[in-house]
Amino acid sequence: METAKKSRAIYWLLFLVSVAVFFTVYAFGGGYCTLVLPFNVTLFALSLDLL
């Protein structure tokens, strides 16, 4: 049985977008940047295929 190879490019793209959003929120909101961190960590784990 062969397993289908998943493309993780969309996860890398979403991770990079979430990092850009993190720095944007950090520049304008300061303390609210922690609201973006769960997206960063989750998308990074998905892009490395850890989840």
Image (spheres, rainbow, N blue to C red):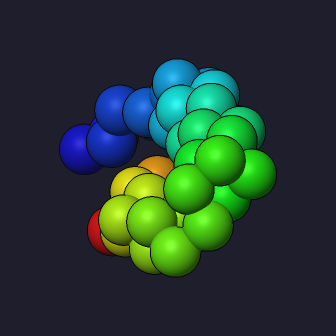
Q: Quadrant of residue 2?
A: top left
Above/below status of 29 relative to 2: below
- Kindly tell me whether residue 10 is visible in this rendering: yes
Task: Work out whether residue 23 or residue 14 is closer to the camera in this orientation and state it.
Answer: 23
| Residue 16 percent location from the top left of the image | 70, 38
Q: How many marks?
A: 0
Q: Is residue 23 left or right of residue 45?
A: right
Above/below status of 46 relative to 13: below
**On-image quarter of the N terminus:** top left
Q: Identify the residue shown where x is 35% and y is 32%.
A: 4
Task: Work out whether residue 24 or residue 39 is closer to the camera in this orientation and state it.
Answer: 24
Above/below status of 25 relative to 5: below
Task: Work out whether residue 47 or residue 18 is closer to the camera in this orientation and state it.
Answer: 18
| Residue 13 percent location from the top left of the image | 63, 28
- Kindly tell me whether residue 37 is visible in this rendering: no
**On-image quarter of the C terminus:** bottom left
| Residue 17 percent location from the top left of the image | 62, 32
Q: Identify the residue shown where x is 65% and y is 47%.
A: 28
| Residue 21 percent location from the top left of the image | 60, 39
Above/below status of 28 relative to 33: above
Q: Identify the residue shown where x is 53% and y is 65%.
A: 33
